[in-house]
Image (cartoon, helix red, strand yellow):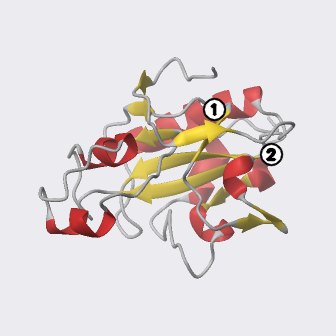
Amino acid sequence: MVLFSQASYTQSPHFDARPVGTDVSLLVIHNISLPPSQFGTPGIRQLFTGTLDPDEHPFYKEIAGLRVSAHCVIYRTGEIEQFVPFDQRAWHAGLSVFQGQSRCNDYSIGIELEGTDTLPFTDAQYKALVEVTDFITKCYPRITLGRIVGHNDIAPGRKTDPGEAFDWAKYRMSISIGK
């Protein structure tokens, strides 16, 4: 079970084993806020643990029953919560394809940033994202700079995250790959 020691761990029921012989070779950056554009709520944790109450917010009625997860969520404070061990398959990518290979969940790791497409992410989030990225790329060396993408890159037209507010240059210049 591959966990990031600097993260708290809350197990999601929404994961399974990767296909036998699958090499983890892709890192996918997402954003999420629940309810939309609200931060610091228990909504993300509830969604990823299957405990979201559809009566708590009108938007929750639309997503009630979704069986989704990510490997980690990085909250606005920089706190990291891991929901699925990296060696297991989280259900974050949905219908997706990268360089002609479909089923990105099989071979990817999904990291969610608490945020939206249009609001800037915090410095604490970038710092935490760099730390977890450096850990992941040491564990999974097939994840190279060109294999770190946004959800929008693997599900174009369907997904837009991490969005225009995500500073790819700041992030890429801070990670250790190739240094």
Q: Amino acid at mark 2?
A: Thr
Q: Furthest residue to the front?
A: 65
- Secondary structure at badge 2 equals loop
Residue 126 coordinates in the image, percent (x, y): 48, 43
Q: Furthest residue to the bottom?
A: 157
Q: Nearer the viewer, residue 170 or 155?
A: 155
Give the label on residue 139, or none: none
Task: Tell me if 133 is positioned left or right of 66 in this view.
Answer: right
Q: Which quadrant does the N terminus fall into?
A: top right
Residue at 15% of width from left, 68% of height from top?
58
Inter-mark Cα distance, 2 to 1: 16 Å
Residue at 53% of width from left, 46% of height from top?
111
Q: Which of the 4 quarters of the picture holds residue 81?
A: top left
Q: Please identify, in this view, whether the residue under mark 2 or under mark 1 is nearer the observer.
A: 1
Give the label on residue 144, or none: 2
For mark 1, what is the residue?
86
Q: Residues within 10 Å of mark 1 (few under 14, many from 20)?
A: many
Q: Which of the 4 quarters of the picture holds residue 9?
A: top left
Residue 156 coordinates in the image, percent (x, y): 63, 77
Mark 2 or mark 1, which has the lower sequence index? Answer: 1
